[in-house]
Image (cartoon, rainbow, N blue to C red):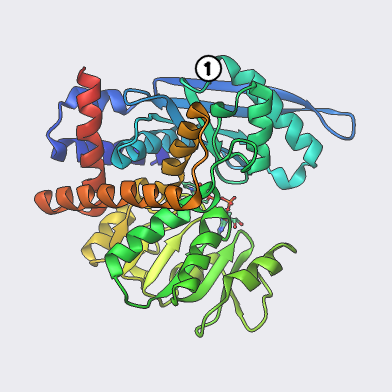
Amino acid sequence: MSTYENAQRILEESGKISGINQEIVEILKYPQRIINVFIPIKMDNGKTKIFEGYRVQHNNARGPYKGGIRFHENTDLDEVKSLALWMTIKCAVAGIPLGGGKGGITVNPKNLSDGEKERLTRSFVRAIADCIGPDKDVPAPDVNTTSQIMDWFADEFGSPAVVTGKPVGKGGSLGRDTATAQGGFYILNEMIGNEKKRIVIQGFGNAGYHFARLCFDAGHTIVAVSDSQGGIYNASGLNPNEILERKNTGSVIGFKNTKTITNEELLETDCDVLIPSALENQITEKNAEKIKAKIILELANGPITPNADRILWNRDVEVVPDVLANSGGVIVSYFEWLQNKSGESWNLEKVQGELKNTIIPAYKSMLAEKEINAVNMRTGAYVVALKRLAEKIKI
Ligand code: NAD
């Protein structure tokens, strides 16, 4: 089953439990619009290369489409459609007035110079410019897309409010870079209180690194982290700030006093809390039985397949779903958009306070549906979202 078919399946199952009109579920099973572009770029060697890009606008019943742009060599339409659908659900669970969209370009940005990356970003903006805008569709960063890329994006379009995740000082919001991790961390604290946990983190980028740092500062033990090259393990704990210095030279692999492990081994490492913060489909029916963690908080989008979800549910593993766990990113993107539109600049305390005041009520709404319907957290979150979407779609 493709990732998108999996996404549709969860929607259908939650739709039945939510009691909303099935025609609304049917509407939400499909994106409203798909934009597929082919972008010619003059490479540094003088040759022209064509890149394929997508923007999927899933649903705007609750507000302008919102969602990141991903640069990855495996990005395809199926992936971008799934990510767009999840954004619609995510914004509705968070209770923010935005819809769901996502974009991507099939490219490995590590093979591009800065100049090539800038030309690719600017050409992509020109290719989709008719379909985006501050009140239409507002992209953001995702895998391999940085605040610098968002700045080129805003500059090419000619308005800061067309995109979020910009550098602070160029219309970006304080706290946006750490927001995804921060939101997930607020939820984890709500679940575990003052207990100290052993934590494993897959992916050491924006989401994974900041989450590791927050856990380390709070006194938890980070026993393993990884990136696309593989993972490192030390039962007595790792300092994410020291690892970041090492990572700047390439990979986390080879960090002092650590054992090198594969990403597969990392997921099965003995720990209390597992944080997938890399890519989709990492925990499947092949490894779900072997996961030792009792809590999995999905900072990545779609890291667990539906079959694996069922196995984990039967094994009493608590899974905080992506549509809630990583919603801190889009919540603070929403704050950035509000600041751009009103000309305000919020301080960090206000951003983080408002983030907590948004994500914790979302978590509690999810818990209420989970308990009423005796379902897992993912279905609880979808039921919250579907009821909110149904109200708007009906109107
Ligand atoms: P990033 O590009 O900053 O980092 C990605 C990390 O994953 C890197 O360390 C990379 O080496 C690692 N990685 C890539 N392939 C891997 C593999 N096969 N195995 C293990 N690690 C691998 O991206 P990010 O912004 O941190 O996004 C990570 C995940 O979080 C994605 O699923 C993204 O959709 C999700 N997310 C991000 C945000 C955000 O604000 N950045 C918001 C919501 C969700």
- Residue 58 falls in image quadrant: top left
Which amino acid, by three-letter code, is at mark 1?
Answer: Cys
Q: Residue at x 89, y 29 (%)?
A: 46
Q: Residue at x 31, y 70 (%)?
A: 294
Q: Is 190 located above or below residue 356 in the figure?
A: below
Identify whether 285 is placed above or below 36.
Answer: below
Q: Depth check: 116 or 147 in front?
A: 147
**Are there few (<14), some (14-19), or many (20+) residues within 10 Å of tag 1?**
some
From this viewpoint, is residue 2 visible? no
Q: Nearer the viewer, residue 210 or 323?
A: 210
For the view shown, which residue lies furthest in the top direction?
A: 130
Q: In the rendered image, which quarter is residue 54 located in?
A: top right
- Find residue 265 and report its horizontal and vertical position in percent: 50, 71
- Residue in the image at 36% along x and 71% along y: 293
Above/below status of 8 relative to 313: above
Residue matched to label 1: 131
Q: Position of residue 233 (x, y in %)?
A: 55, 77
Task: Decide if residue 225 is on the left or right side of residue 371.
Answer: right
* Location of the N terminus (image quadrant): top left
Question: Residue sitting at 49 percent across and 73 percent down?
Answer: 216
Q: Nearer the viewer, residue 89 or 343?
A: 343
